Amino acid sequence: EAQVTQNPRYLITVTGKKLTVTCSQNMNHEYMSWYRQDPGLGLRQIYYSMNVEVTDKGDVPEGYKVSRKEKRNFPLILESPSPNQTSLYFCASVSWGGRTEAFFGQGTRLTVV
Amino acid sequence: AQKVTQAQTEISVVEKEDVTLDCVYETRDTTYYLFWYKQPPSGELVFLIRRNSFDEQNEISGRYSWNFQKSTSSFNFTITASQVVDSAVYFCALSEAGTGNQFYFGTGTSLTVIP
């Protein structure tokens, strides 16, 4: 079954404490990306990766890091989280071509206090 | 400029009414894809439909139908005989061949179906 697995689903943390949200896909997709969802703003892209070791900034990259050491994994790293990073985060794995589609993880609800 | 505009922020309808969610997009690519996703209160994103730019045929799936019109750059979504379970946030999205696999999302329309 095609799957994008994100962990954790919920996380409450304190300002400045480094955290990582993991994302893994089993579809051998080259393209993966991270979005944050905020009320009234829809989904905004944070970072994306076209392939292993190839990453680039999206629309709202400040305060985030990513890495793509393996095709299946694309973790999102917050080195020093701040309250304005409280949001709902989604990882996506994208197939391109005639069956273009974005497969999303279940979402991670992050609260930074 | 916003590539995908969903002008309706919130809509409320009474159960069994029909409702149309509007989506207007902007692109210069000739090859692109349009999508609708549903986000129920539980928060996950559920894929509803994909349309490519070369296929303007309207599509019907049960109570759902989609009207794709390139002339007006619109991809509207109609729910017929709405039900309480249709209450959710609905997102329209665009993916352009020219920008790789990046997806552009609208800001979403929150639909509430009142029993």
Image: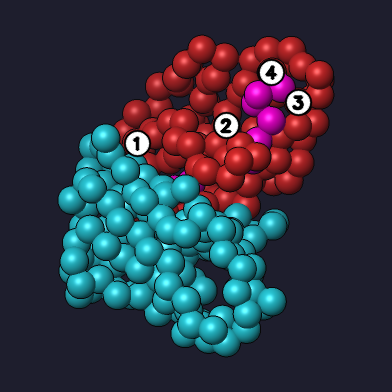
Chain colours: A cyan, B red
Q: Disc 1 on helix, strand or loop?
A: strand
Same chain, marks 4 and 2?
yes
For the point 51% across and 74% down, the residue is A60
Write down the residue under mark 2: B76
- Distance from disc 4 to disc 3, alpha carbons, whole Å, reads 7 Å
Mark 3 or mark 2: which is in front? 3
Toward the viewer: A32 or B75?
A32
Write down the residue under mark 4: B82
For the point 28% across and 39% down, the residue is A2
On screen, B52 above or below B18? Answer: below
Label located before the other in sequence (1 or 3): 1
Same chain, marks 4 and 3?
yes
On screen, B27 above or below A99? Answer: below
- Distance from disc 2 to disc 1, alpha carbons, whole Å, reads 14 Å
Label located before the other in sequence (1 or 4): 1
Q: Disc 2 on helix, strand or loop?
A: strand
Label located before the other in sequence (4 or 2): 2
Image location (x, y in percent) of residue B55: 34, 29
Write down the residue under mark 3: B113
- Distance from disc 1 to disc 3, alpha carbons, whole Å, reads 30 Å
For the point 38% across and 64% down, the residue is A22
Amino acid under label 1? Asn
Q: Let me know if residue A93 appears in the view.
A: yes
- Is mark 4 in CB contact (under 8 Å) with mark 3? yes
Q: Which residues are magenta?
A: B84-94
- Distance from disc 1 to disc 4, alpha carbons, whole Å, reads 27 Å
- Is mark 1 in CB contact (under 8 Å) with mark 3? no
Q: Disc 3 on helix, strand or loop?
A: strand
Q: Neighbour class for label 4 at 10 Å: few (<14), some, many (≥20)? A: many
Whether the magenta-drawn stretch holds residue A31 is answered as: no
Label located before the other in sequence (4 or 3): 4
Amino acid under label 2? Asn
